[in-house]
Amino acid sequence: MEFKKWALTLFAAGTLVTSPAPCVAQTSEIEASKASIEYVTVEKEEYPFLNDKIGTVIFDRWTEENLKTMTNAACNCSVKNFIFCDSITSGLAMIKSGRADFLMTTDITANYVARRNHDLKAINTPGGLEIVMSMRSSDGALKDSFDAAIKKLKETGKLAELETKWIKELPVGQEPAAAKIEKASDTAETIYVGVSGDMPPLDYIAADGKPAGFNIALLAEISKLTGKNIEVVSMDSQARFTALESKKIDVFFWMVFVSDPSVKELMKQNPDEQSMNKKFIFTDPHCIVKTGFILKK
């Protein structure tokens, strides 16, 4: 079968989108525990495995009813209901207890979880999604400096090196380690970055409570290139927008997309979404992922 040109995705840490045909998988997690990981072809932009199911997602910008309406309209499916969760831990607990049938996340996170929880499986769908960093709309200069650093990391191959080390070649029995972010200087500006740990191994909080994994390694490189001190702040996913708007943090990791016309029209009907886009800006993407679903076997 051939993938459709457009694959609709709804993402736990992002928004409702339609993205171009799939990119190459960003993780080698599929090389093991293949029985726990499935890649599905979505034909006619339908998601039948979501029909009459209860989903959970780390999402707080809309009401649960609005999210269900948007999902069913865009995916041509009939999700029964959504129950918001405040972390990936609580979302997985809901699946295991039977309160929810699936958790929406990225393919990298779905694969990561499925390989470490033998009672769960990952279903990954086509469509490339872009991970970015969110900032206040007034911080255009900060965005420019981060964009320049991301561009440099791509050009030098350093970004690909980080992906290989922290994502593609991460062994099942090894959790993401903490990369050290060196202090740029005593006089440099300090940028506070919020990390929730709800998208492992990208966004990860270690057992000792310290942020670790790919995003921390990326921030260490950005600090070197921008000459800015970077302090990482652990926080709940639900608190990120409030913390950013109140200037308790300056940056957090997020998802943005360029939707196709039909989805853009749906988004126009949601004033809360449009209001958010006026308040915040986003860096250029630094990682490409796909949509993943975590379900019980």
Image: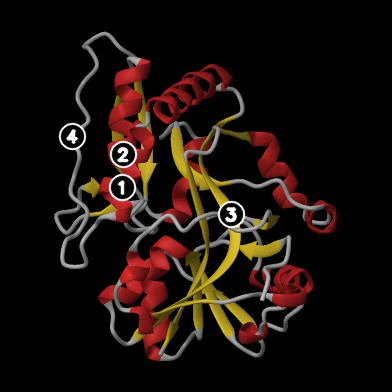
How far separated are the C-alphas under marks 4 and 3? Answer: 30 Å
Q: Which residue is mark 4?
A: 180
Query: Against 114, is 142 above or below?
Result: above
Q: Label 3, secondary structure: give it.
A: strand
Question: Looking at the picture, which amino acid does disc 3 mark?
Answer: Gly
In the rendered image, residue 224, in percent from the top left (x then y), is placed at 29, 20
How far separated are the C-alphas under marks 4 and 1? Answer: 18 Å
How far separated are the C-alphas under marks 2 and 3? Answer: 20 Å
Contact? badges 4 and 3 (CB < 8 Å): no
Query: Is residue 213 at least partly visible in the picture?
Result: no
Contact? badges 2 and 1 (CB < 8 Å): yes
Apparent side of residue 143 relative to residue 89 in the rendered image (left or right): right
Q: Residue at position x 50%, y 80% from top?
A: 102
The answer to which image quadrant residue 79 occupies is bottom right
Apparent side of residue 51 relative to residue 36 in the rendered image (left or right): right
Query: Against 202, is 44 above or below?
Result: below
Query: Is residue 181 at least partly visible in the picture?
Result: yes
How far separated are the C-alphas under marks 3 and 1? Answer: 18 Å
Q: Which residue is mark 3?
A: 128
Q: Which residue is mark 2?
A: 161
Is tag 2's residue or tag 4's residue first in the polypeptide sequence?
Answer: 2
Contact? badges 4 and 1 (CB < 8 Å): no
